[in-house]
Image: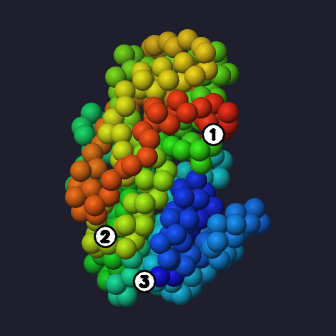
Amino acid sequence: MRIFVSGASGHIGSAVVPELISTGHHVVGLARSDAAAEKITAMGAKVRRGDLDETDDLRAAASAADGVIHLAFRHDLMQAGDRNGAASADLGAINAFAKALAGTGKPLVGTSGILLLAIANPGQVGTEEDVVHGGFRIDAENLVIGMADRGVRSSVVRLPPTVHSVLDTTGYIPTLIGIARDKGFAAYVGDGTNRWPAVHTLDAAHLFRLALENAVAGTRLHAVGDEGIPFTQIAGTIASNLGVGVRSLEASAADDYFGFLAPVVQLDSPASSARTQELLGWKPNHPGLIEDMNQGHYFRTAGSSPA
């Protein structure tokens, strides 16, 4: 199939594009910059220049494709404090894809986040059946799922906060390592028993391909390898690899240490992928988060902010 991929040059896209090409698909990747275009070309895909704000171009690109994987998000707007602008651009892009794909039965695979479930249902093990009815980024997830009623074979892959591998240079784990390096110690809040799910980037990429090829319209999927790693274990692994100590912080001190990540590191967000594995035969086969961190690559590249 000819697949149009937004976010093709990003962390997840850098694994999804080779996964698609290796199994015989032809990929066209959206590129906002010369650097992104060069990266997409180097992976063996075609380039379409543009960005999420150019909705007419997105509609044309989707119309010319046999399917769409939507990975892009305006993180630059988020970092500039324009959360509403980032959400609006995402919804605009999805609506453009909807206009192109409605009534065709072609696949559209969108992207969402498992942490959104923790905000709505704290402490519960998140499942694919869990639905949140509205909110930041949730509106985009629900829009994609609703396209099943418009003749699109739509699905959403929910990603954990930690999608980890050598390709992850700007996510939460590199950021936490950078903070620990700067502060001289790793930290968690309270007893640190809150749990984070995780998945290896290559396992996530495999799930995106399976969703594109086989997901039933209106399906929510979970890219979860580790169902819930206690944050104390994440902090301890950072500390041991950096050769620094690890401390418990009071909630009142979290902002000073973690900055904008303070609310996120306190979330308890265990999640299951049992239904996804049953539906698509997907199995996470690559190293889990702690094993991957102990391979050392994060401690050679860490320090940027999440993308």
| Residue with the mark numbered 3 | 101
Instruction: Tell me: 184 left or right of 237.
Output: right
Query: Residue 44, labelled with which disc?
Result: none
Question: Up-down: is 109 above or below 270?
Answer: below
Query: Residue 305, labelled with which disc?
Result: 1
Disc 1 packing (10 Å; few <14; some 14–19; many ≥20): some
| Residue with the mark numbered 2 | 215
Provide the secondary structure element on which disc 2 rests: loop
User: Where does residue 5 sit, x and y in percent of width and height?
Assistant: 54, 70
> Which circle's residue, 2 or 3, is located before the other in the chain?
3
Q: Residue at x 28, y 50 (%)?
A: 273
- Asked if one can make out residue 32 in the rendered structure from this viewpoint, the answer is no
Q: Residue at x 55, y 11 (%)?
A: 245
The three-letter amino acid code for the residue at tag 2 is Ala
- The Cα atoms of the two marked residues, 2 and 1, are separated by 33 Å
Q: Residue at x 50, y 65 (%)?
A: 19
The three-letter amino acid code for the residue at tag 3 is Leu
- Asked if one can make out residue 49 in the rendered structure from this viewpoint, the answer is yes
Depth check, mark 2 against mark 1: the one in front is 2
- The Cα atoms of the two marked residues, 2 and 3, are separated by 16 Å
